[in-house]
Amino acid sequence: MASLTEGLRSTIESIATQFLTGPSRAVEAKDPSLCLAVVTAECPHHLRPLAFATANPLLKAVKSNEEHKALMESALSTMEETRAEIKELVIDTVKRKASVLAEHCTKIIGVEANILEVTWFLDFTENGKQVSRVTVFIDTATATRRVADMKKRGFMNAELQ
């Protein structure tokens, strides 16, 4: 039993890490689909706190994969680079969940890089090989500045007209 649990824990850790490094790979390859490489086809993406989502309605409180991909495609055009550093990762193999505290350092074109603190809550499939639900809580002060900087560089302009 211990080896099954340890195997599942290792799988979930690997998939969580791949999920968090997806945006970095997407920026490098200029391919937003890399952000979805380890999620299920029906994976919902929840943005919290709700007050931030309400203040930024184009970001949406709940997005489908296609909506998330479109958002990332627009965001990628404004980024020079991004990377995530996992500060803490907690895995529950019984519930097939992971909680991750991460720092996301992003360099927007023409703007000094900034660090966004993010807490992720990820649900996984039974075998742990895919993320089935994403909930992200963000540092709203930094995120508000980042979204403003990105909008100055064309982020979501087509949707705003």
Image (tube, grey):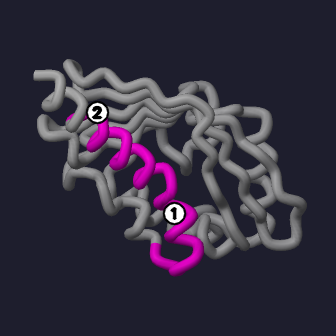
Q: Which residue range is magenta in the image?
A: 8-31
Residue, far bottom? 29
- Determine the main secondary structure of the stretch shown in magenta: helix
Left or right: 89 as drawn, with respect to 55: left
Q: Quadrant of residue 156?
A: bottom right
SS for callout 2: helix
User: Which residue position is annotated with label 2?
Assistant: 9
Tag 1 secondary structure = helix
Name the image quarter holding residue 37: bottom left
Q: From what the image shows, is residue 145 above or below residue 102?
A: below
Q: In the image, is 76 to the left or to the right of 18?
A: right
Alpha carbons under labels 1 and 2: distance apart? 29 Å
Residue drawn at the location 41% of the way across and 68% of the way down: 34
- Residue 32 left/right relative to 95: right
Mark 1 is surrounded, within 10 Å at the Cα level, by few (under 14), some (14 to 19) or many (20 or more) other residues, namely: many
The location of residue 90, given as percent across then percent down, is 44, 24
Instruction: Name which residue type carries label 2.
Output: Arg
Which numbered tag is attached to residue 72?
Answer: 1
Between 73 and 117, the one nearer to me in the picture: 117
Q: Give the mark nearer the N terminus: 1 vs 2.
A: 2
Q: Which mark is residue 120?
A: none
Can residue 158 be seen in the rendering of this structure?
A: no
**Percent from the top left, x then y, of residue 133?**
30, 37
